[in-house]
Structures are given as structure tokens and as C-alpha cells.
Image: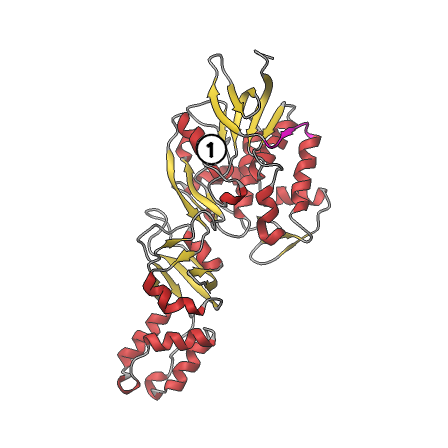
Amino acid sequence: MTDGRQQFDVIVLGGGAAGLMCAIEAGKRGRRVLLLDHAEAVGKKILISGGGRCNFTNLGCTWENFVSENPNFARSALARYTPQDFLAMVEAHRIPYHEKTLGQQFCDRSSRDIVTMLERECAEAGVRIQVGTRVDRVTANEGGGFSVETSSSVFEAESVVVATGGLSIPKMGATGFGYDVARGFGLRMVETRPGLVPFVFSAEDREAWCDLSGVSAEVVATAEKPARRGSKQPRFREKLLITHRGVSGPAVLQISSYWKPGEAVEFDLAPELKVFAGMTDTRDWAAAMAGVKTVLPGRWAERWLARHAPDVRVMSNAAISAMEEAVHRWRVIPAGTEGYAKAEVTAGGVDTAELDPRTLEARKVPGLFFIGEVVDVTGWLGGYNFQWAWASGFCAGQVA
């Protein structure tokens, strides 16, 4: 004790996926670990994930499944702790799970299985968990180490790991505290924005389409610009859903992480199909309607033709080609997104240039680590963000 302050080797701020994993790994090394969370229980976002069944990893996870100013940054952590490593823990706890699609792994029963597993691992590793505790400030001590001031006490430790998450889903208690800590220690930030989030249409597009709320189709979504110079233009083939305010669905959520205000997104409504093939010979309006209805639900198909088809009397080859082009390149400039309230993740965060990719330790501040969503590493939909949480937490836990 120093001035009545409780001493630990490691203090982890945040009881989400990354924080719990880090605490477990540090505890296994014999470190005295305190995990603090302001919520009344740990793992709250884990519990609501995957529709309550927790899409806890993806077997196809690589660094290429992440959005960041430096996507290569995630390569080291993801190589050191793989989906198979997490599956080994799940299987050791005899949690039944299944693969849904595209490598996504889900609990058979409930997300509660994953939270219970992590809590048991923490207990076995000797981790002390203290919930219902608001952290007010983190400061560096003159003689080394850190002080963590909370709503109830002051704690000291050699290392502090910031795993407080991002701004998404504020009703679950999300805050920007982790970003405040980073700025307080002089670390650079990448501007944050909602990720994996539905789009909101302009008033004009809303009037044109949003009365069709509830209809969906498989599309290919493409961002107007690559995530960064020299990178591939992202493309996602999944479902799009029209909502009462814009569009959602997996394809939209995926492409939203690459979108910046003012940019356009494009949707191919008939992937790999020639919808109006043969119409240059028949000029048959019924054939046009039948063609669109092969790729879009009835109401949407009728609306699409009403807005894009030429007058049947002047249905030239050029007009038919333009109609074909339009169905493959529905270009939309969203008015915005549904914001952090509906975002599954926060894109941006602590600049990866400030962190060691092997350990997630701040280069300028030895003993201070940032892991999980608070870092500028954002995964695709489908278990990738959980795998980043496990991997980054594991790596920090080996050295904190």
C-alpha cells in the first residue's frame, strides 16, 4: 500500500471481450490483475451480439478483413492468436457451437455461455473484477507506473490496459473515455465515426423508396473510393434491406465502414445477371418486368421500372443498355447514417502508429496499452471484431 492506495501489477479498464481476454492472460502469468468496469456486470455487449447467440469468431479471419489507416497493423496480433485458439477455449468449456455461413461461429444456446466461460477463466487466473465503478482519470506516477482514480477509490499499477471500447450503442453505456485517456497522454487519434451502421437517405431518395420498407434483395455493395490509396475497392455480396429511413442489411453495414460523408455507394441489384438480355429483339415490356422480378421483389421491381424504364415507344438499344446499366449501378449518396445508436462498432480511434503491433503498448508511454475497439482497427461484420478483441487482448496480456 502507498498512502492507502491499493496496488496491482495490471489494471484493465473495461470488461468487454478484449479486456476480459487480456485480464485472463495477464493473470495466468501470475500478475495481480484488477479489471474495472462502470457497468453492473461484465460482457454486456457480448450478451447482445449475434442476436443473443454471439458470433464469437470467423474461421476465415485475416488482416485483410479490417478497416484501418494501416490495415497491416492487425496482422501480428491476428497471427499470434487465431480463431482456432479461441475455439480451443470454447471446446474446453464444452460450449456447443455451429458454423452459420462464411466461417461465422455461433453459440448453439446463448451468448451467456461465452461470458460465463470468460468469467470462469478470470476466476481461475486470480483476476479481481470490480463492476459498477466509474474511472475518472488515469495519470502517470513520478516514480513509474500509473494511478487510476475511480468513483470509489484510487488504484495503482505498473501497467494499465485501456479496453473501454468505442462510442457505438451508447444505451449500453458506451463512452469516449478511452479516447480521452489516449489524448491525455499525447497519443494521436484517427477521427471516429459509426461503423457497421445503416444509411439514411436524402429526402428525395426517401420519398422514392422508403415506402417499400421491409423489402430486401441480394446485392453487391461497392464503396466509391478504396479505404486508402493503393488498396482494393471493397465489394460485399449480401442482403440489402430498405428501411423507413434508408437502407440496412449486411451489405449496407459492411460497406458503411468504408463510407465517408459526401461520398457515394453503389449497389448492383442483379449480380452476374443480364436482366434485359434479349429485349433488343422483342422490345417486350412484359419481358422487362419479368426480368426485374427475377432479382427484386414485386413492389420494388415495379417501382424500379417506373423510375428507370424508357417509354416503350422509344425503347432503343441504347435505352435498353442504359436500363441494364442502371440496375447494376444504383448510385446513392447517403444523407448520413443512423449514428452510434445503431452502429455495431466505432471506426477510427487510437492511431495504430502510436502502438507496438506485437503488444499494443503505447510507444511513447511504456506500461500503457490500448486494445479492442478503442484502437483504429475495425473488422467486417461476421465475427471479425470479436477475433480482434481476443487477439489484441491476448497479445497485451502476454506482457502487461
Q: Which residue is drawn at 67% across and 36% down?
A: 119
Question: Relative to 112, does residue 303 appear above or below in the rendering?
Answer: below
- The range drawn in magenta is 125-132
Between residue 299 and residue 330, name the one nearer to us.
299
x and y percentages locating residue 209 in the rendered image? 39, 68
Main secondary structure along the magenta-highlighted residues: loop
Q: Is residue 39 left or right of residue 323?
A: right
Q: Can residue 96 be seen in this view?
A: yes
Q: Mark 1 points at which residue?
A: 178
Q: Which residue lies furthest to the right in this view?
A: 94
Residue 382 or 47: which is nearer the viewer? 47
Q: In which quarter of the image is residue 91?
A: top right
Residue 397 at what x, y percent from top left? Answer: 57, 30
Q: In the depicted view, which residue is nearer to us: 278 or 388?
A: 388
Q: Identify the residue at the far front of this view.
A: 151
Q: Who is closer to the viewer here, 69 or 346? A: 346
The type of residue carrying mark 1 is: Gly
Graded by Cα atoms within 10 Å as few (under 14), some (14 to 19) or many (20 or more), the crowding at tag 1 reads: many
- The C terminus lies in which quarter of the figure? top right
Total number of numbered labels? 1
Q: What kind of colouring is applied to the model shown? A: secondary structure
Q: In this view, does 25 lie above or below 197?
A: above
Question: Please, is residue 287 above or below residue 74 in the view?
Answer: below
Q: Is residue 208 above or below residue 148?
A: below
Q: What element carries label 1?
A: helix
- What residue lies at 58% left-to-right and 39% top-to-bottom? 17
Q: Taking the image as drawn, is residue 58 in sight? A: no
User: Who's the residue at 67% across and 46% down the image?
Assistant: 112
Q: In the rendered structure, does residue 104 fall within the stretch colored magenta?
A: no
